[in-house]
Image: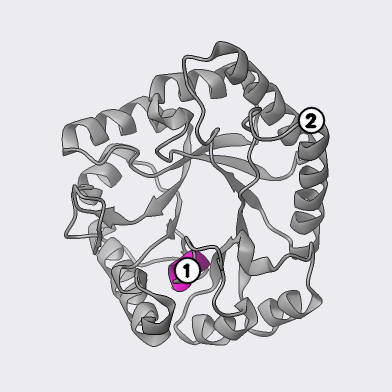
């Protein structure tokens, strides 16, 4: 299992209007020093410009691979017209080519109602068009709450109907509930899961370490069985106000979380992870 580091874990302003508190080029040297090699990059970290020579050169300089573009491209037909979507998609295509991303992470219709068959059909058509524009890029639908992922069977049916070789699921528990429902989600989605997001929560959705929360990661990984790549998405020490954020402490905690996952798997991580 290759375990990437998500740069959102190191961004305390992630859910504020500011979005980014420090430029990505300032984070990359310390990420590399902490031993990480593969990254999932929070799209706002790439700046408002489509491409940045400084970011690309810094990634190369520090031996860091931009594996996943964690994008906020929204295919929900209620929030963008076809022409608006096309403009945003052109930017995504150029970014992927410029930085060399292998995978694109998307939310499966944020705010969409699974019962709205017409909207779901439009979403499905847009997804097919996106996958066609990026035939060499894996498109990963993150099983995030407040999206079509709240109906796991619908999401699986959508993926199976499209039957696209570059389309799959990025698993994280969608439900903040006891283990039975989470494991049921794994069983339904298992054939199409290609990547994992590691984080853990309490029932009130507060963040805790991987070993301490309601998501039973040893059981989830046992249920999945087959090896696959993953991303460490959040660490508890990173959930704070920007003025209180401690980069060194968050990177230390990230290393500890990766070691915990190694312990579950009972084998060392590969060379492209920490």
**Range covered by the magenta-colored residues:** 6-11
Sequence order check: which comes first, mark 2 or mark 1? Answer: 2
Of 75 and 125, nearer the camera is 75
Residue 219's place in the image compared with 131, above or below, is below
Query: Residue visible at 38% across and 44% down?
Result: 172
Vertical comparison of 219 with 15: above or below? above
Residue drawn at (27%, 55%) of the image: 200
Mark 2, residue position: 82
Q: As drawn, is 151 to the left or to the right of 7?
A: left
In which image quadrant can residue 242 be found?
bottom left
Q: Position of residue 122 (x, y in %)?
A: 67, 20
Front residue of 191 and 49: 49
Q: Is residue 220 left or right of residue 12?
A: left
Q: Residue at x 73, y 61 (%)?
A: 100
Q: Which residue is mark 1?
A: 273
Q: Tell me the distance, in whole angstroms, between the alpha carbons under discs 2 and 1.
A: 38 Å
The mark lying in front, picked from 2 and 1, is 2
Residue 41 placement: quadrant: bottom right
Which quadrant would the C terminus be assigned to in this image? Answer: bottom left
Main secondary structure found in the magenta portion: helix
Location of the N terminus by quadrant is bottom left
Q: Secondary structure at mark 2?
A: helix
On whether residue 78 falls in the magenta region, the answer is no
């Amino acid at each position: 299992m290759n375990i990437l580091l998500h740069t959102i874990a190191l961004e305390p302003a992630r859910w504020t209007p500011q979005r980014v508190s420090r430029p990505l080029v300032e984070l990359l040297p310390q990420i590399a020093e902490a031993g990480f090699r593969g990254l999932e990059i929070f799209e706002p970290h790439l700046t408002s410009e489509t491409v940045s020579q400084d970011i690309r050169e810094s990634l190369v300089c520090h031996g860091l691979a931009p594996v996943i573009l964690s994008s906020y491209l929204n295919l929900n037909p209620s929030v963008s017209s076809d022409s608006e979507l096309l403009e945003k998609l052109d930017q995504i295509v150029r970014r992927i080519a410029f930085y060399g991303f292998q995978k694109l992470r998307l939310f499966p219709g944020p705010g969409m109602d699974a019962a709205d068959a017409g909207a779901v059909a439009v979403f499905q058509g847009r997804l097919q068009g996106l996958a066609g524009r990026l035939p060499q890029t894996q498109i990963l639908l993150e099983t995030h709450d407040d999206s079509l992922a709240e109906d796991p069977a619908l999401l699986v049916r959508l993926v199976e109907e499209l039957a696209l070789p570059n389309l799959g699921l990025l698993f994280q528990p969608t439900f903040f509930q006891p283990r039975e429902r989470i494991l049921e989600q794994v069983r339904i989605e298992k054939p199409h899961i290609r990547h994992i997001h590691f984080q853990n929560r309490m029932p009130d959705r507060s963040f805790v370490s991987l070993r301490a929360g309601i998501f039973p990661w040893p059981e989830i990984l046992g249920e999945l069985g087959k090896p696959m790549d993953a991303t460490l998405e959040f660490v508890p020490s990173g959930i704070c106000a920007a003025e209180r954020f401690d980069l060194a402490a968050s990177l230390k905690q990230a290393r500890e979380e990766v070691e915990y996952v190694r312990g579950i798997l009972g084998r060392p991580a590969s060379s492209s992870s920490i």
